[in-house]
Image (cartoon, rainbow, N blue to C red):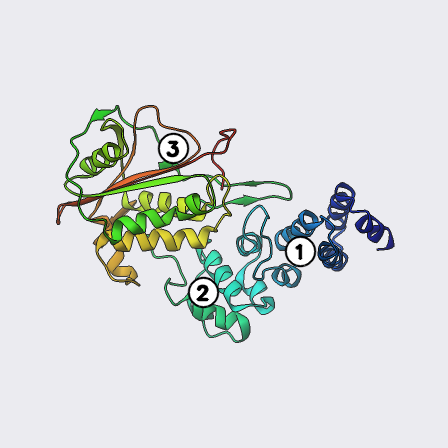
Amino acid sequence: MTGLQALIDVADTAALLRAVDGLCASRQWDALADLGRRCLDAVELGKQLWPVATHIDYRLALEAPPAHAAAVVRTGAGRFALGPLTEVAAGSHDWAALSPHLPEAAAAAAVAQERVLRGEDLTAAATAGGAAGAGMALAAGDMPLRLAAWEPAYALPRYRDREAAFPQPEASVRPLGGPRTLSPAAEDEDDDAARALRGTVETWVAESSGRVATAAVRGSGAAAVGRLLLDTGRQPSAAFAVLGAGEALAVLQWAGASGGAYGRRRGGAAGRFSAWWAATAVAGLDWPPDPGELGEAVGEGELGEAVGELDWYRWSPPGAETGWVLRLAVADPLDGLAWAVEAVDQRDDEVPPAG
């Protein structure tokens, strides 16, 4: 470690990152954790080694045995990592392996819900003690500790040592029909459903350079889109694709998990929460909803109950921007209400969507 300390003393970031690769390759996890602590100490002395310290935490969460991975899953860690460390660690370790080592209840709750997103049923694990048990209590407070039978297959990130991929749901990239002229409906009050749809992408606005608009009307989904376009100074014309309720939830989850172009990624579990929150508000149910009341599997790819009774659409105006995009419309045909949301975020160089 003497040689590594010399690299710390001169703040040789490139050499330290190469050393991190070597320690990971040789699986020297104790040495890697110690190097991370030394880099953090150096940061407090004014040396610009926070990228190295952050990368070490990320590699530990991704590749190290459960005890080392869980140790870095704590409040404030990984602020500039490729993704939240709760999601990184949960993507490569199951709950049984991580839970005995998690140091904080809040982190345990996030990890538990990330594992649920990956198909684990943790309802029987809710009686665990320590931070894991407290985390389970937090995790179960609003969201079930297993996927409902009617939930879609959510798009999950793929983390690697130096890169990550954040695929969109297939429904987000499916071709749309031809554009058509719309008849905007009169604006209804900005209700809870519109606010919930907007809240799904709040990070795109608060932490990045994105913009978001919503419309609530009495009428159809197309009328809501027309209202939104007119209110934002554009011609009421758009192309549409009909979505199943499960597909719409998958799109909302992707958007809620993302940080947009520059914001911090919130993680898949946070995205699922946002999707449920928005669907509950649009369906007119109280929070937290009963999973069986919110949705019900009635056939392959089909949903019944509240979300299945709504009409969901993806839409796009002519000449739409690329980047991070959420454009959905949803209509309640029984009550004659409809909502539309549009959120767009881009990097300065307009690269394709990421997390």
Nearer the camera: disc 2 or disc 1: 1
Quadrant housing residue 286: bottom left
Q: Could you tell whether 343 is left or right of 66 in the image? A: left
SS for dot 2: loop
Residue 122's label in the rendered image is 2
Q: Do the residues bearing badges 2 and 3 touch, measured as CB atoms within 8 Å? A: no
Tell me the CA gap for discs 1 and 3. 35 Å
The kind of residue tagged 2 is Leu
SS for dot 3: helix
Looking at the image, residue 253 lies above or below residue 95 = above
Q: Do the residues bearing badges 2 and 1 touch, measured as CB atoms within 8 Å? A: no
Work out whether residue 86 can be spotted. Answer: yes
SS for dot 1: loop
Determine which residue is flagged by label 1: 64
Q: Could you tell whether 344 is left or right of 259 in the image? A: left
Farthest residue to the right: give it: 2
| Badge 3 density bin: few <14, some 14–19, many ≥20, Cα 10 Å | few
Mark 1 / mark 3, whichever is N-terminal: 1
Work out whether residue 296 can be spotted. Answer: no
The kind of residue tagged 1 is Ala
Quadrant housing residue 326: top left
Mark 2 / mark 1, whichever is N-terminal: 1
The kind of residue tagged 3 is Val
Tell me the CA gap for discs 2 and 1. 23 Å
Determine which residue is flagged by label 3: 173
Q: Residue 322, image x and y in percent?
A: 42, 29
Mark 2 / mark 3, whichever is N-terminal: 2
Tell me the CA gap for discs 2 and 3. 32 Å
